[in-house]
Amino acid sequence: MKLHMFPFAPNPAKVRLYLAEKAELGCAIPLEEVTVNLLESEQKSEAFLAKSPFGTVPVLELDDGTCLHESLAIIEFFEATHPTPSMWGDDPVSAAYARQIERIADIGVLINTAREIHTSNSPLGLPANPPVSEYHAKRRAQAVAHLENEMSDGRPFLAGDRPTVGDCTLQAILQFARFREIDVLEKAPRLKDWCDRYRERPAAKKTILL
């Protein structure tokens, strides 16, 4: 298998963090990483578009040539083929809650922060659009506030007492935000503490570059 990725992009970083956490739990998944340089527009090449029709990363290329090009679909594939230990939860309620947290981290924080960045200070050179950037900044702040409130019970991780996919998702977009010098957690002290602690984890030290 090959994972086509760019390390600073949030969705590949999310998958790479997941894989690192899985390995720390004793379930290393062997694959080859292939860097697609987004800053050099390698994602627009004909060869890459044949693997990812939208020109996005990550892409998981299976041994038979099948390509998966959505980060959560890739993670779900790995969870289905390597179910133990689970990065969701051990029972239906905890698994559903962990998925809920991940969706808030992804749809609420990751997507809005990425759009905020790409309409204000895009590393890909996309045009600035201040009203759109401000809209996504407000949407992102709402999701951050929700996750900050969820942490008020003293839990060590976003969904409880152990890391789940949501931790990987939020850490991935925080790295991208640091890359573009945006403080996503400015008004979220509990999440800041979580972030500092998480970045000391072996999986984070192996994966997070910034």
Image: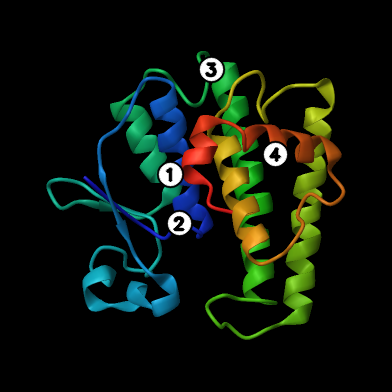
Disc 2 element: loop
Q: Which residue is mark 3?
A: 92
Q: Give yes or no for contact between labels 3 and 4 (Cβ–Cβ under 8 Å).
A: no
Q: Amino acid at mark 1?
A: Arg
Mark 2 and mark 4: Cα distance apart in space? 18 Å
Q: Which residue is mark 2?
A: 7
Q: Amino acid at mark 3?
A: Pro
Up the image or down, 55 lies above or below 84; here it is below
Q: Position of residue 39 (x, y in %)?
A: 45, 75
Disc 3 element: helix
For marks 4 and 1, the one nearer the N-term is 1
Up the image or down, 130 lies above or below 145; here it is below
Q: Which residue is mark 1?
A: 16
In the image, what residue occupies the spot 45% across and 56% down? 7
Q: Give yes or no for contact between labels 4 and 1 (Cβ–Cβ under 8 Å).
A: no
Q: Amino acid at mark 2?
A: Pro
Q: Residue furthest top?
A: 91
Mark 2 and mark 3: Cα distance apart in space? 32 Å
